[in-house]
Image (spheres, rainbow, N blue to C red):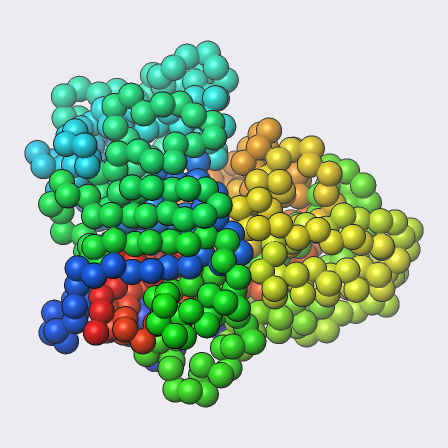
């Protein structure tokens, strides 16, 4: 991803501002047409699509727990939300629109939001025949808050009145969530500039009445969006069928998705190439991208899109050598960002030493640490005590290579590292568990919604640390920084973005809980039977919109 110029500003009905980056617009690599072009090109719909999910499985499909980007790609097919992002490329795909409800009436200084559910809930209806009501959304919020769920959603709704009591086990329903007929009223403890973006997260999709509280996640359940999960055999396969009761406007061109999980990346590539499989969610191996480009397949079968994401080395500040800030700064000087990005292949992204991606509002380039080549002399001047470290990585081949690169970089400053590789879902579960015995983790993060809080507060607000499902893999918890993050989150407009931009720089410079590496692109390789005119890259979820795909 190269740094892009802002296209403009989309103003939502509530006054929340979302900035849309040119780099996220369709056409960044030559551009596919919109899904609406499918009819004009006489593309086929109604066929089944075979998909590989190489080197991993879904973390969850239960909306209260699903958090991996590939899981959100599929829950986007199934979910019905109060407000949703449209099935469109950027910039339109970043603009919230009404789905089951109209935009809310906001009162009492911006703390009370009243949503009115549409008579037909925007065409949403559960596959069981149950209607989507205001209670469907209240139930979702309260289920998320139930401590037995251990949902990562809690961090996004702590400002709802009564939410903290439910999360602490002191009640079952948040007092700030009230249903009155077709109206859902949500009361916040204070005004929030990003509340509508947060309530549109997949965690808060409508759920059927009586959905069990299950901390391990329901594997099959009723859905009210265009698709439903009909089967998920963990570790093997999953099937998604059209929801026969959905009558909304969202595309559902494919009749059935059959997903095989934990496949070998190289084998998956060959299957896509031969047409046995239509897509590998993991993307083509980095070593194959150059050949696909040379074959002239860009924007025909190969699509490369920038993401609002960051890839980083999180250093565990709660144990071992990385409790020492100088050790963390030394790693920032010693890590070879060029080699790390090269392992991801051609057109893979842009090196950077900062946490926020350039497309995130408030980003300011600071050039704190070296991005072209390591500076071992500087690293050694900062830290010379040596030691050992356990490093976690994901197990796709290029990620294992990155682990080896980091191991070598650490060796140059006297740190002996052992590298352990896990399937992605396992990696995030282990690194997200408080007290897990690791010292560093090479992870990746993409925005949940377009706001700087979704990077810095998620990464570094120590008040959000819980027993599991953490994204603060550094377990960084500094009271003064927590207060600065809280203050930044209370602001709006330019003041909000300026505060976060400054924090992005100061946390990297003064505390260095991460050694940020690069901001990646997403490569997608479809089989020859897929029609490129239907390709839509949904910028919020940073994935192809599978509901919009069609066939030649």
| Quadrant including the C terminus | bottom left
Q: Is residue 190 above or below residue 372?
A: above
Judged from this view, the residue extending furthest toward the left is 119
Q: Is residue 126 above or below residue 474?
A: above
Q: Position of residue 147 (x, y in %)?
A: 48, 21
Q: Position of residue 41 (x, y in %)?
A: 14, 76
Q: Position of residue 29 (x, y in %)?
A: 38, 77
Residue shown at 12% from the left, 73% from the top:
42
Residue shown at 14% from the left, 26% from the top:
182
Q: Is residue 314 above or below residue 30?
A: above
Front residue (pair 511, 198): 198
Residue shown at 8% from the left, 34% from the top:
119
Left or right of 275 in this view: 254: left
Q: Quadrant of residue 136?
A: top left
Judged from this view, the residue extending furthest toward the right is 385
Left or right of 42 in this view: 331: right
Q: Quadrant of residue 35?
A: bottom left
Judged from this view, the residue extending furthest toward the top is 170
Residue shown at 37% from the left, 59% from the top:
51
Q: Position of residue 287 (x, y in %)?
A: 56, 76
Front residue (pair 508, 550): 550
Q: Is residue 309 visible?
A: no
Front residue (pair 198, 191): 198
Tally of marks: 0
Q: Is residue 467 visible?
A: yes
Left or right of 377 in this view: 220: left
Front residue (pair 232, 2): 232
């Amino acid at each position: 991803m190269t740094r892009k110029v802002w296209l403009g500003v989309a103003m939502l009905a509530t006054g929340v501002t979302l900035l849309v980056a040119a780099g996220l617009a369709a056409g960044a690599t030559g551009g596919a047409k919109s899904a609406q072009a499918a009819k004009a090109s006489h593309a086929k719909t109604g066929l089944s699509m075979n998909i590989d999910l190489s080197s991993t499985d879904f973390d969850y499909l239960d909306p209260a727990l699903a958090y991996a980007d590939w899981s959100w790609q599929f829950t986007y097919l199934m979910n019905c939300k109060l407000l949703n992002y449209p099935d469109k490329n950027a910039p339109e795909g970043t603009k919230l629109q009404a789905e089951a409800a109209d935009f809310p009436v906001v009162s009492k200084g911006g703390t009370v939001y009243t949503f009115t559910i549409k008579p037909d809930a925007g065409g949403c209806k559960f596959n069981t025949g149950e209607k989507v009501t205001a209670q469907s959304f209240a139930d979702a919020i309260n289920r998320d808050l139930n401590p037995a769920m251990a949902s990562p959603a809690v961090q996004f709704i702590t400002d709802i009145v009564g939410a903290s009591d439910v999360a602490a086990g002191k009640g079952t329903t948040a007092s700030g969530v009230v249903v009155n007929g077709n109206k859902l009223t949500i009361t916040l403890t204070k005004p929030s500039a990003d509340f509508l973006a947060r309530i549109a997260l997949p965690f808060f999709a409508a759920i059927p009445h009586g959905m069990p509280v299950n901390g391990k996640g329901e594997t099959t359940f009723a859905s009210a969006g265009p698709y439903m999960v009909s089967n998920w055999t963990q570790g093997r396969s999953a099937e998604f069928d059209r929801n026969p009761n959905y009558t909304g406007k969202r595309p559902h061109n494919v009749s059935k998705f059959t997903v095989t999980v934990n496949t070998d990346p190289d084998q998956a590539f060959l299957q896509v190439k031969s047409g046995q499989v239509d897509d590998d969610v993991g993307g083509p191996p980095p070593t194959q991208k150059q050949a696909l480009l040379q074959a002239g397949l860009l924007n025909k079968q190969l699509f490369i899109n920038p993401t609002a994401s960051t890839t980083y080395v999180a250093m565990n500040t709660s144990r071992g050598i990385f409790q020492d800030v100088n050790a963390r700064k030394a790693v920032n000087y010693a890590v070879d960002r060029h080699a790390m990005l090269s392992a991801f292949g051609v057109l893979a992204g842009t090196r950077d030493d900062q946490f926020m991606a350039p497309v995130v509002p408030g980003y300011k380039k600071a050039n704190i640490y070296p991005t072209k080549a390591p500076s071992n002399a500087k690293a050694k001047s900062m830290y010379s005590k040596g030691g050992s470290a356990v490093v976690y990585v994901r197990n796709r081949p290029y990620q294992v290579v990155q682990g080896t690169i980091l191991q070598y970089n650490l060796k140059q400053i006297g740190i002996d590292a052992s590298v352990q590789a896990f399937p992605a879902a396992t990696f995030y579960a282990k690194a997200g568990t408080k007290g897990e015995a690791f010292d560093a983790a090479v992870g990746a993060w993409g925005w949940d919604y377009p706001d700087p809080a979704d990077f810095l507060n998620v990464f570094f607000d120590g008040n959000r640390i819980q027993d599991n499902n953490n994204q603060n893999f550094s377990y960084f918890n500094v009271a003064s920084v927590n207060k600065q993050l809280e203050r930044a989150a209370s602001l709006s407009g330019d003041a909000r973005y300026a505060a976060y931009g400054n924090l992005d720089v100061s946390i990297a410079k003064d505390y260095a809980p991460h050694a940020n590496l690069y901001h990646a692109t997403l490569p997608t390789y479809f089989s020859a039977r897929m029609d490129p005119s239907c390709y839509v890259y949904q910028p919020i979820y940073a994935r192809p919109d599978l509901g919009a795909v069609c066939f030649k």
